[in-house]
Amino acid sequence: MTYTAHYSVLKKECLDSMYADWENSNEEKLLFADLTFGGGGHSLAIVARDERANLISFDQDPDALANGRKLIEESGNLDRHHLVDSNFCHFGEVVKNNFQELVDECGGFSAILMDLGVSSHHFDEGNRGFSFRVDAPLDMRMDSDNDKIQTAKDIVNKYSELELEKIFKEFGEEKFSRRIAQRIAVDREKKPIETTFELAELIKQCYPAKLRYGRINPATKCFQALRIEVNRELHVLSEVIPQIIPLLKINGKICVISFHSLEDRIVKHEFKRLEKDNDDIICEVVTKKPILPSDQELDENPRSRSAKLRVIKRVEARKQKNKYAKFSTIK
Ligand SMILES: C[S@@+](CC[C@H](N)C(=O)[O-])C[C@H]1O[C@@H](n2cnc3c(N)ncnc32)[C@H](O)[C@@H]1O
């Protein structure tokens, strides 16, 4: 298996945000986490930027992990860079059971990164079933050696017509979700729908003829919806953010790159909720508007066009809003 090179989106912006309060600090050791190692571009750059940096990286994809182990060995930073095979929804538990000493030594995490979704490898490695451009079994599991996870084939052939319509509508924002779900329910009675080409062709037939051959393949939205359902992407995202906030040290940050509006909405609302919360952990949203890729990045990698980076920071105390501030210089 060769792991397809992955362009690390918003890399400079992420690293600058993650290191913002630490570059000139006098801490002897810094602790970071990258919950989505992928091709390792962000992770390796985090470790390379400062000799004090320790990093715990997570991924659930066996290809990313095998490639990652090699990359970390080659980097010569095995002592500072730990790679964990797990869904990031178990982050709190894994850290507590395996890295508590390191966390205590560093006083908590300086920054935690999430670069959501799948990597270029998932699309380019056709046999994983993520892409409608290559004929392959309908799988779409990131954690592809985990038999407990339902594949896209299981979902397409077992979910009720109503459930299918709901996921196509909610996770794919697909206009023809009802028609597609009805057609699946009819066709699978004759024979199970097993491959990416079978499903893509069925979806195409549900589109009005004049919309079948546009710039965007009609299967795009339903494939996205199935991928989100298979990997419970939105569910694990909402679960993990509140879990990692208490692990940050003061001035520690969470940086999240999202690629579609469903993810971005969760991140935005979750950050706002944490900022408003009046419990003992005080947070401030750093990015009132999300950070977007520069024109240069868009030229280099058009796939970054939908990326948005949002950052939240744990702070010691809420900023006092002084309503007399603007008069304070008047004598
Ligand atoms: C967009 S890629 C990350 C790319 C990476 N930042 C880079 O620079 O190469 C997302 C990676 O996160 C992994 N991933 C997505 N959701 C995950 C989850 N819930 N738990 C663990 N890994 C996850 C995927 O398997 C994929 O390898």
Image (cartoon, rainbow, N blue to C red):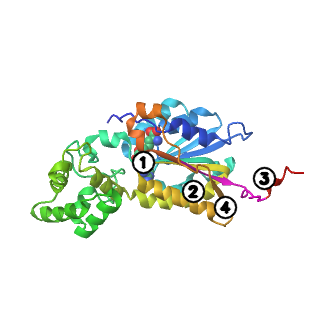
Which residue is more in the foreground, 72 or 323? Answer: 323
Locate residue 312 relative to residue 324 in the image: left or right: left
- Classify mark 1: helix, strand or loop: loop
**Magenta region includes residue 320:** yes
Percent across and percent down for residue 63 are 36, 42
Q: Residue type at mark 3: give it.
A: Lys
Part of the protein shown in magenta = 310-323
> In the rendered image of this protein, does residue 300 appear above or below residue 250?
above
**Magenta region includes residue 19:** no
Between discs 1 and 2, the one toward the N terminus: 2
Which residue is at the far left? 190
The residue to which callout 4 is attached is: 281
Percent across and percent down for residue 13 are 55, 38
Between discs 2 and 4, the one toward the N terminus: 2
Q: Residues within 10 Å of mark 2 (few under 14, many from 20)?
A: some
* Tags 2 and 3 touching, CB below 8 Å: no
Q: Is residue 79 visible?
A: no
How far is disc 1 from disc 2 in space, using C-alphas?
A: 21 Å
Image disc number at residue 244: 2
- Classify mark 2: helix, strand or loop: helix
The residue to which callout 3 is attached is: 326
Between discs 4 and 1, the one toward the N terminus: 1
Q: Residue type at mark 4: give it.
A: Ile
* Tags 1 and 2 touching, CB below 8 Å: no
Is label 1 within 8 A of ligand 1 (CB to nearest ligand atom)? yes
Which residue is at the far front? 330
Is label 4 within 8 A of ligand 1 (CB to nearest ligand atom)? no
How far is disc 1 from disc 3 in space, using C-alphas?
A: 40 Å
- Classify mark 3: helix, strand or loop: helix
Between discs 2 and 3, the one toward the N terminus: 2
